[in-house]
Image: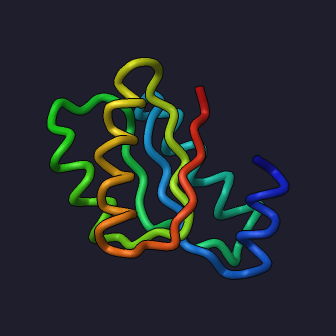
Amino acid sequence: MLSLLSWANYKHKKIYFLGAKPEVAQTLSSKIKETYPEIHIAGINDGYFKDDSYIVETIKNSNPDIIFVALGFPKQEFLLTSIAIFLILFGWESVVVSMS
């Protein structure tokens, strides 16, 4: 993960973080901004949501280059399937990283 973040910083990539508890997600966002100032955080959501379609739409609208997902099994796999459909249908060139 650190190598990918270093590369993303160097290339000025947009990253979306999805998962974890709200306070963990916010702490992660702050640390990323501090450590990798050239990364643009396209979005961040904790893992406590009920509406997958809202999250998928939010991710789609933020147009990230890299999506880090940490939701746990099986929630993560179901959501990644929905995200993958958008990746294919809309020709995104995003990378999705599963964290669990």
Residue under the image location 44 percent in, 44 percent down: 18
Up-down relation of residue 23 to residue 96 (above or below) = above
Left or right, residue 83 beside residue 98: left
Examine the image and state in which quarter residue 76 appears: top left
Residue under the image location 35 percent in, 70 percent down: 62
Please count the marks in the image: 0
Instruction: Locate residue 36, reporting x and y percent.
Output: 74, 66
Examine the image and state in which quarter residue 7 appears: bottom right
Residue under the image location 67 percent in, 57 percent down: 32
Instruction: Locate residue 79, reporting x and y percent.
Output: 33, 38
- In the picture, the quarter occupied by the C terminus is top right
Up-down relation of residue 84 to residue 10 (above or below) = above
Examine the image and state in which quarter residue 35 appears: bottom right
Q: Along the line of sight, which residue is nearer the eye, 37 or 97?
A: 97
Query: Which colour assignment does the render follow?
Result: rainbow
Up-down relation of residue 22 to residue 18 (above or below) = above
Residue under the image location 73 percent in, 81 percent down: 11
Instruction: Locate residue 90, reporting x and y percent.
Output: 31, 73
Judged from this view, the residue extending furthest toward the front is 88
Judged from this view, the residue extending furthest toward the top is 73
Left or right, residue 3 beside residue 57: right
Instruction: Locate residue 28, reporting x and y percent.
Output: 60, 45
